[in-house]
Amino acid sequence: MLDDLKQAGYTIFYSNLYGKNWGSQEAVELAKRLCMHIRKSEILNDKFHVLAEGMGALTLLKLLKIETKFRSLVLLNPILSLGKHLEQEKEHKFFYKKLVTEIASAYDIHPDYVYEHFLQVEEDPRFPIETPIKIIHVLTGNRAYKQSSILKGYSEKWKVDQVDYNICYLVPEKKPQIGSQVLQFFGKHERFL
């Protein structure tokens, strides 16, 4: 996918935002600094596209509260709610314990309090209505189908909020098409610079 974007002429900036950050404030601050760097050093137009994958969507959601000048957003298999993700992973004991440890480290809280903390502070993901969003969700395994039902619940709220979004579900065999779908979506939202 990155090769597709580079071959199409896109300049790509990337950060893993301190690794397993799970949307921590430290990751949000780094993402904000990256946006500032891009605007100062590379882009003539101050609006650019953002592509976030998995837990990167958690960081993006927090970044959108302080930074909204994006041309479009593409979210790949996004985790949009840490509380719902924890709830979903609870039945997978081995993965759940590892997840709780990672979140506790990212947020500097004791692992015993992670679950309760994120269920209490949970909020629905909000997107700016002026920024078009494409969510690409690859349906692999039982977790993916649970995630798609979570997305369906959010989509009802986004319709009411008049968010410009599109959800695309892909079977694993179609993963090579992700790059072309991203390019098509980005190109569609470059008509007016």
Image: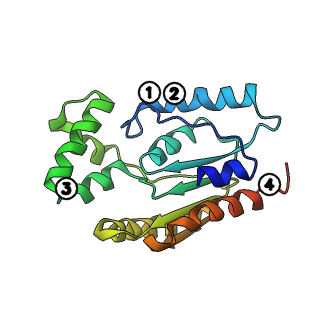
Q: Secondary structure at mark 2?
A: helix
Residue appearing at x 32%, y 31% in the figure: 107
Q: Position of residue 79 (x, y in %)?
A: 41, 53
Q: Which residue has dot 2 on it?
A: 29
* Kind of element beneath mark 1: helix
Nearer mark to the viewer, of 2 and 4:
4
Q: Amino acid at mark 1?
A: Glu
Q: Is residue 151 above or below residue 76?
A: below
Q: Which mark is residue 26?
A: 1
Q: Given the image, on which type of amino acid does mark 3 rest? A: Lys
Question: Few, some or many C-alpha atoms within 10 Å of disc 1 (few <14, some 14-19, many ≥20)?
Answer: some
4 to 65, vertically: above or below = below
Mark 4 sits on what residue? 190
Say which element carries label 4: loop
Q: Position of residue 178 (x, y in %)?
A: 57, 63
Q: What is the distance, in whole Å, between disc 2 and disc 3 at their CAs?
A: 29 Å
Give the residue type at disc 4. Glu
Q: Earlier in the sequence, mark 4 or mark 3?
A: 3
Contact check, label 2 and label 1, Cβ < 8 Å: yes
Residue under pointer 3: 90
Instruction: Please tell me whether mark 3 sits on a helix, a strand or a loop.
Output: loop
Closest to the observer: 68 or 98? 98
Q: Nearer the viewer, mark 1 or mark 4?
A: 4
Comparing labels 4 and 3, the label whose residue is closer to the camera:
4
The kind of residue tagged 2 is Glu
| Residue 162 % position (x, y) | 63, 64
**Marks 1 and 4, how far apart at CA:** 31 Å
- Reading the chain from its start, which is encountered first: label 1 or label 4? 1
Q: Is residue 120 left or right of residue 80?
A: left
Q: Earlier in the sequence, mark 2 or mark 4?
A: 2
